[in-house]
Image (cartoon, helix red, strand yellow):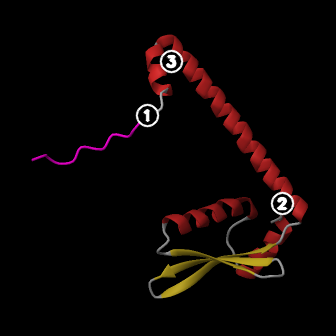
């Protein structure tokens, strides 16, 4: 959504929010749909021609109030590939960072308490069943 498209949507839906706050409002509405699913709804309708519409609706006990409608269109295949590659590479670098941190912790534990490191690296052979009540 660019600023020009937002202005058109703002006029159509009589929105009180400014463009700078649009992403915060959208995030807040999505979170409300997750946390308060009994009162906030998000309905996504996709059409075969690549257009879609996401409606945010609030269930007031006596009526449904439409809060915001967002229109979507299908992105070109190359853009989708770029987004997937970016997210994959970001997650891959995050994994490498976490792996590095784990190696640092292992090295520290090896120096401070080698027997603990051996215990941590051992795979459990069988899971113990939790104790239940009293035996007769």
Q: Estimate the x, y position of residue 129 in percent, counting from the top left.
A: 31, 44
Question: Gap between marks 3 and 1, in whole Å?
Answer: 20 Å
Secondary structure mostly taken by the magenta-highlighted segment of the chain: loop
54 is higher (above) or lower (below) than 124: below
Front-lying residue, 97 or 65: 97
Q: Estimate the x, y position of residue 131 in percent, counting from the top left.
A: 24, 43
Magenta-highlighted residues: 124-136
Q: Residue at x 80, y 72 (%)?
A: 7
SS assignment at label 2: helix
Taking 31 as reference, is 97 left or right?
right
Q: Residue at x 44, y 16 (%)?
A: 115
Determine which of the numbered discs, if any, sits on residue 80 in the image: 2
Any magenta on residue 130? yes
Any magenta on residue 122? no
Question: Gap between marks 1 and 2, in whole Å?
Answer: 43 Å
Front-lying residue, 57 or 82: 82
Q: Estimate the x, y position of residue 83 in percent, counting from the top left.
A: 81, 54
First-in-chain label (2 vs 3): 2
The residue identified by callout 3 is 109
Q: Estimate the x, y position of residue 13 in percent, counting from the top left.
A: 71, 80
The residue identified by callout 1 is 124
30 is higher (above) or lower (below) than 48: above
Q: Residue at x 75, y 43 (%)?
A: 90
As drawn, the residue found furthest toward the left would be 136
């Amino acid at each position: 959504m660019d600023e020009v498209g937002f202005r058109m949507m703002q006029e159509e839906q009589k929105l009180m929010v400014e463009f700078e706050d649009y992403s915060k409002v959208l995030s807040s509405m999505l979170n409300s749909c997750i946390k308060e699913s009994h009162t906030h709804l998000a309905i996504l309708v996709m059409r075969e021609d690549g257009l879609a519409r996401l409606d945010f609706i609030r269930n007031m006990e006596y009526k449904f109030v439409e809060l915001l409608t967002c229109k979507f269109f299908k992105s070109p295949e190359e853009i989708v590939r770029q987004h997937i590659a970016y997210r994959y590479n970001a997650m891959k670098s995050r994994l490498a960072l976490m792996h590095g941190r784990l190696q640092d912790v292992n090295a520290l534990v090896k120096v401070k308490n080698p027997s603990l490191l051996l215990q941590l690296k051992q795979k459990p052979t069988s899971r113990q069943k939790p104790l239940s009540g009293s035996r007769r």
